[in-house]
Image (cartoon, helix red, strand yellow):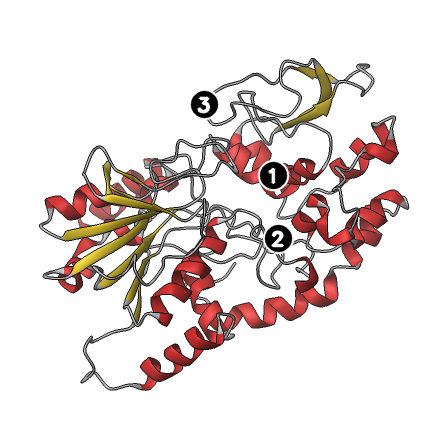
Amino acid sequence: MKKITILFVLFCLATIPLTSLIAQIIPGADRPEKYLPLLKGKRIGVFANHTSVVGDMHLVDFLIKSNIKVTKAFGPEHGFRGKADAGEKIDNYIDSETGIPVISLYGKKRRPSTEDLADVDIMLFDIQDVGVRFYTFISSLEEYMIAAFENKKPLIILDRPNPNGFYIDGPVLDMDYKSFVGMKPVPIVYGMTIAEYAIMLVGEKWLTPKANEQWEYYKYASTSVDTPFFFKVINCANYTHKSLYELPVKPSPNLPHIQSIYWYPTTCFFEGTVLSEGRGTDHPFCIFGHPSIAPTNKFAFTPTSRDGAKEPKLKNQLSYGWNLFKDAATVKKEVNGKIQIKYLLEAYQAFPDKANFFLKPKSGKPTDFFFNKLAGNSDLMQQIIEGKTEAEIRASWQEKLEKFKRIRKYYLLYEDF
């Protein structure tokens, strides 16, 4: 009888889909028992956007419902509610749903001021990242951390899974090309969650001298200081860097699905060229092209104005190019843990006016080309112009990539791929 029971159990397990047997990934925000006790009786400043959810409720709404006093909200690129266009500057305002003042950190300033934090006891950070250097949320994170440490405000980061956290690739940023789309010497795809990245910022002393000094003091201070912690991370549960995580909420208007997120490290380069990167279409960053590319065997599309892309590049112009949109599993397989620079090479060869392929700054300086800011150097542009092969280009990345990989391993919170 016992043998029959065991066989029956094994049969039942065999008929259950594998995904049902894998423990569900739980973001830090969905583990309120880990952070609500730290917030009770304190005045909280929250860096958040529309991805900052607890279940189906916005984090700020959840905190208020949990009797936590939220005195200030801070919003990144695309705004606190995530509705603004990419690059659109946003002013401070009062959130209509909560009455809480929202300080824009993607407008006149990038960092909370001492005045902004006067009525804040603890700073909270919760943003869904996509694990790509030129996605500006890690730059906002760095500025927020500096403000917290310099003003001696305890900081809690609610970690979230990285949908591109299963590989590392791309050129490492040359600090001569530092900008808000690349502030630290990391590759384009760096294979870390946003909390792991934050730990690396403090561990490598990549913040300001004053912020680094404060961290060194509080790191070794006893719990007899005013607060029992200075920097705390609420981990994700059941996540590893082998996990494939599809976001429940689109992280920004032009990353509406996992296919766009997978292709983003490759096709965002087209923002630094005259080609459309697919904004103003149903599948941004899966589509790219230009009106002057020969239509023979090329995909046709027309970017139009829509929410999140009111004035897309090549608006209302019939364009020809590439459509990389397929089912998620196929796209994941095609990306294959690499930035697929072959598409940059193909597009450059197909473009008839090569002298005007890259968007040119008025200064003409290599450091001012937006393409170079995305790449983190001027080498990639020059390699494309010179007709270097994909293998030659990739080989030029390897030494710095290997160095970064060694650094990265010190700061991982989760099992690596």
**Residue 289's image quarter?**
top right
Q: Determine which residue is flagged by label 3.
A: 307
Q: From the viewer's perspective, tell me whether residue 221 is left or right of residue 402.
A: left
In this picture, is 270 found above or below 25? Answer: above
Local crowd size for mark 2, using a 10 Å CA cut-off: few (<14), some (14–19), many (≥20): many
* Residue 286 seen by the camera: yes
Q: Residues within 10 Å of mark 1 (few under 14, many from 20)?
A: few
Number of disc labels: 3
Mark 1, residue position: 333
Identify the residue at image location x=65%, y=70%. 403
Percent across and percent down for residue 398 are 73, 62
Of the numbered discs 3 and 1, the one sitting upstream in the chain is 3
SS state under label 3: loop
Compared with 145, 263 (above or below) is: above
Q: Could you say which disc has been placed on residue 68 in the image?
A: none
Kind of residue indicated by mark 3: Asp
Residue toward you, 116 or 75: 116
**Above or below, 390 relative to 308:** below
Quadrant in which residue 322 is drawn: top right
User: In terms of depth relative to the viewer, which is nearer, 5 or 305?
Assistant: 305
Q: CA distance from mark 1 to mark 2?
A: 19 Å
Looking at the picture, which amino acid does disc 2 mark?
Ile
Q: Identify the residue position indicated by label 2 in the image.
A: 188
- Alpha carbon distance from label 3 to label 1: 30 Å
